[in-house]
Image (cartoon, rainbow, N blue to C red):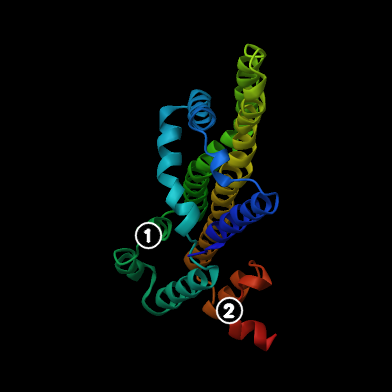
Amino acid sequence: MSPSTIIGMLLALGALYAMITLEGAHVGALFLPAPMILVFGATIAVTIASGTVGDAKRALFAVPKAFVGKVNPPAATIEAIVGYAERARRDGLLALEQEAAEVDDPLIRDALQNIADGTDAEELRIILEDTVDSTVQEQKKSGKFFMSMAGYAPTIGIVGTVVSLTHVLENLDKPDELGHMIAAAFVATLWGLLSANFFWAPIGSKLGRLAELEEQRLGLVIEGMLAVQAGSQPRVLGERLRAMIPPSSQPKQQKEAA
């Protein structure tokens, strides 16, 4: 679990609260039902309208992943692939069928099964690459959904402010209430900007980043499983796969040895 999203949002909200307090304002003045309903409700509505209901459902179910989701470390994936290479050299490719029955990762499971079934190397690469592409694209859609929300929210906030200012102009004969009404009018713009930059954009970016990390890991799986099928020497295969990941993702003991 990576707590970066939660930590970042809390720090951003804390900075906002500090500013409000230092300015001598009241936090309660920002929580006005009308502009919040418009900004949040309309933002969700127009984003749904710009895509499909399926996109909205996927994005909703992906929200927890932005806060508690994680990608399996590439080092663990490499270790597993090297283990399959050792098993294949020791017991033959048919032995990988037994390994496939014990694997949770769907891509590795399919690769092991295809190798045991004798699938041609080129066909196996096409199958695995197509699977990775469809899987990653599915994950990226959720991130794009929230990035779209981040794009719509500020404009909708401005719409709310314009509507409220229209109401202000209708009540110019009540000077004692104008200050409060004008302040309330700009709350909609505030919520549009705040929700876009404090909530929607961070969630969308986090989901997109998780999809990128997963894509990198699945790329290791493709190259590793094809090498297993080709009968690569396990130690050499491990070194080759570790060379494909950034130094920050290398196992601790390896970085110390370097």
- Which mark, residue 78? none
* Position of residue 82 in the picture relative to residue 247 (left or right): left
| Farthest-out residue, front | 176
Whole-angstrom CA distance, mark 1 to mark 2, is 24 Å
Q: Residue at x 52, y 49 (%)?
A: 129
- Label 1, residues with CA under 10 Å away: few <14, some 14-19, many ≥20: some
Q: Earlier in the sequence, mark 1 or mark 2?
A: 1
* Badge 2 amino acid: Pro
Relative horizontal placement of residue 227, taking residue 245 as reference (left or right): left
Tell me the quarter of the picture where residue 89 sits: bottom left
Label 2 sits on a secondary structure element that is: loop
Labelled disc at residue 251 = 2
Q: Quadrant of the C terminus?
A: bottom right
> Which residue is identified by label 1?
109
| Camera-nearest residue between 162 and 243 | 162
* Image x and y of residue 225, in percent: 49, 63
Q: Residue furthest bottom?
A: 257
